[in-house]
Image (cartoon, coloured by chain):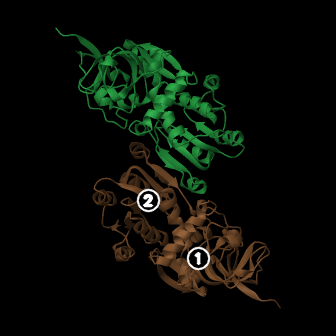
Chain colours: A brown, B green
Amino acid sequence: MSKTVKIVRFHKTGPAEVLQFDELPLPQPGPGEVRLQVKALGLNRAEIMFRNGQYLETPVTPAKNGYEAAGIIDSVGSSVDSSWIGKTVSTVPGTFKLNDHGVYGEVAIVPVQGIAEYPSALSYEQGASIWMQYLTAYGALIWLGQIAKGDFVVITAASSSVGIAAIEMAKVEGAISIAVTRTASKKPALLEAGADHVIVTDDEDLIERVHEITSGKGARIVFDPIGGKILESLATLAAPKGIIFEYGALAPEPTPYPLFTALAKSLTIRAYTLFEVTPDPVFPKAKQYIFDHLASGAFKPLIDRTFRFAELIEAHRYMESNAQIGKIVVIL
Amino acid sequence: MSKTVKIVRFHKTGPAEVLQFDELPLPQPGPGEVRLQVKALGLNRAEIMFRNGQYLETPVTPAKNGYEAAGIIDSVGSSVDSSWIGKTVSTVPGTFKLNDHGVYGEVAIVPVQGIAEYPSALSYEQGASIWMQYLTAYGALIWLGQIAKGDFVVITAASSSVGIAAIEMAKVEGAISIAVTRTASKKPALLEAGADHVIVTDDEDLIERVHEITSGKGARIVFDPIGGKILESLATLAAPKGIIFEYGALAPEPTPYPLFTALAKSLTIRAYTLFEVTPDPVFPKAKQYIFDHLASGAFKPLIDRTFRFAELIEAHRYMESNAQIGKIVVIL
C-alpha cells in the first residue's frame, strides 16, 4: 500500500468548516515542479475569499487552497535541478493558481519558479510570512508608487500582515506612514511596528487627522484593501496628483467613485494586485530587496498567533474575526 | 464720457438666459496682462457647467465666463513686451480662472502667459477652437497615456471638439481610434474626421463591438468625459493594465467604481483635466506639437456652427442640445 498524506480541500464553497483534511496518495512533482514537506502555512485573506467563492479566481471543487508555505524540498520533477532537494524555501503567491497548486497540506507541489529561499535566521513560521505581504507592498509602494523620503503614505487595514509590511517599507524608504485602524487596542502594536502616526477611526476623524498630520498637504500615496464607502474619504485626504492603490475588496458594499474630488485633484485610482509583480521583470529585483531587508532585520515578519495543522478551520475563523495584528500561521 | 464695451456676465447661476451683455467701461490691462479685441469665441462645456454653478471653479457673481477667444492684441500692461500689440493670438484655457479673466466680451483682459499665436492660415473661428480641445487630448493621450502605434483608444462623447481632437491625435500617432457616439447620424462625420471605428450605442453593444474590433484584447486607453454608469462598461472593455481617463462629469448620476473588474485587470482610473498641463514643464512642448500639426494640416479644427455675438445665449442652448459635431463658435 502506497503512502498517503493529508491535503486540505473544500468540496463546496462556504464558511471555514467546508475545509476538509482529505487523505490522498502522496503526490509526485511533475515536470518543472518541486514537492515541499510543509512546515508552516501563512494564511491570507485571499484564501478566505477563495473558500467563499468571492475571489478573483473561481474554485474548481474539490479545490485546494493556500498561497504560502515554508518547508523543505524532498523531491523534484523532471527538468528541475536536483540540488533543490533538502533546501528550505517558501512559496511565492502570484506564481501559481490556487486551483492548481494550493499549499494547504502536509506536502505541496509547486512550480520551481514559485519557490524562493529566505534568510536562514528566520523560522519556518516567519518563512511562511514573507512573500504575500512584502511583495504586495513592494509592488504598490516601491515599484509603481515610487515612495520617497518625506512622502505621506496612508495605510488602511494597517494591522493586516500587508499593512504591517507597508509600515516597515515606508520606514526603510524614509516615507512617513499613517496607519489607519478601527480600534484603539491595536494602536500600540502599530506604533511598535514602526508607524509614524496611527489614526483610530472609532475615536478620530480620518480626514481631519490626515489634514493635521500632513499640514494640509494630504497623502501622496494611499494603500487600501477595503474599498467601498471609505474610498470617498481616501480621495478627500489624498494630495493633489495623489495615487490611491486599491488592492482588495474587503468592504461588502459597492464602491462609489468620487469623480468630482478626483477631477479637482487629478487623482489616480490604481487597482493593483501582486499578480502584476511576479510575471514582470521587476520580480527578481523585488525578491532581492525583500531578502536583503529580511537579512538586515529591517523587515521582521510579525506573527500574531500560530495554530496547529488540525486547527486550520479555527485559524480561518480567527482571521475572519479581524482580531489579529500581523500574520496568522499554521505549523505542522 | 469714456468708451464702454459689452462684457458678458451672469449675476446668478442658471440656464442660458442668465448671461447678460453688461455695458462696462473699457478695461485696461494690468501688469503682466494684455487686452484682446475679440474676433471669435470658442464655446466649451465647462462654461455651461460654470454658468450652472456645477463646475470645479465656483462663480463669484457678477461672473465673467469663457476660456477661448481669438483676436488682436490692442494694448499691453506694464512689464509686457509691447511688440505683442497688433498680433493675432488666442487664449489658452488652464492659464487663468474664469472668474478673473473670462473672455466672453468685445474685449478680454488675460495674462500674457495665457495667450498663444497660431498658424496664420487659420481663421479667427479656427483660432478660437484650438487649445481646449488639443491640449486636453494631448495631456491624456500623449503626455500621460503615451499612446503608440497600434494602441486601441476608445473615445466617448466623440463628437465633442475634444473628442474630434483625440481622433485626429490618435491618427497622427498611429493609434487605432474607436469613436463612441449615441446616434447613427453622427457616424459619417466621425469617420470623416478620421475615426478608425465608430460605435453607435443606440444600435450596437459597446462592449461586444470593442471586443470584436480589438480581437478580444480590449482598449489600452479610454478617454471619457461622461462618468456615471458608463464607467463600468469602460472598465469591462479596457485591456489589462489599461488606463481610463476621466476628464469630465457629464453624467448626472453618481459614478460606481468597478472594483472587481479593476482588480482583475489592474486598471488605472485617472481623473484628469488640462489644468495639469498648463503649469507643467510639458506645456511649451505641447503647444509646439499642436502648432506644428495645425501648420501641417494634420489637425483641422472642426467648426460645427457659428453664431453672432448677440446670439451667445442661443449658442449656449445649442451646445446643451448635444446636436453639434465639433466646435461651436461665436463671431464678433
Please name the residue shown 43% across and 55% down the image. A231
Residue A98 location in percent, x, y? Answer: 66, 69
Crowd around label 1: few <14 · some 14–19 · many ≥20 (10 Å)? some
Mark 1 to mark 2: distance in Å? Answer: 38 Å
- Above or below, comparing residue A235 to residue B292 in the picture: below
- Percent from the top left, x then y, of residue A115? 65, 74
Q: Quadrant of the N terminus of chain B?
A: top left
**Other-residue count near label 2 (Cα within 10 Å), few / some / many at <14 / 14–19 / ≥20:** many
Where, quadrant-wise, is the C terminus of chain B in this rendering? top left
Residue at label 1? A16
Quarter-wise, where is residue A184 in the image?
bottom left
| Residue that protrudes farthest toward the top in the picture | B1
Return the chain for callout 1: A
Tell me the subunit letter for badge 2: A
Residue type at mark 2: give it. Answer: Ile
**Foreground residue, A135 or B192?**
A135
- Give percent across and percent down for residue B171: 62, 31
Does residue A8 appear to the left or right of A125 in the view shown? right
User: Outermost residue, bottom direction?
Assistant: A1
Image coords of residue A158 (percent x, y): 42, 68
Residue designated by label 2: A147
Nearest to viewer (mark 1 / mark 2): 2
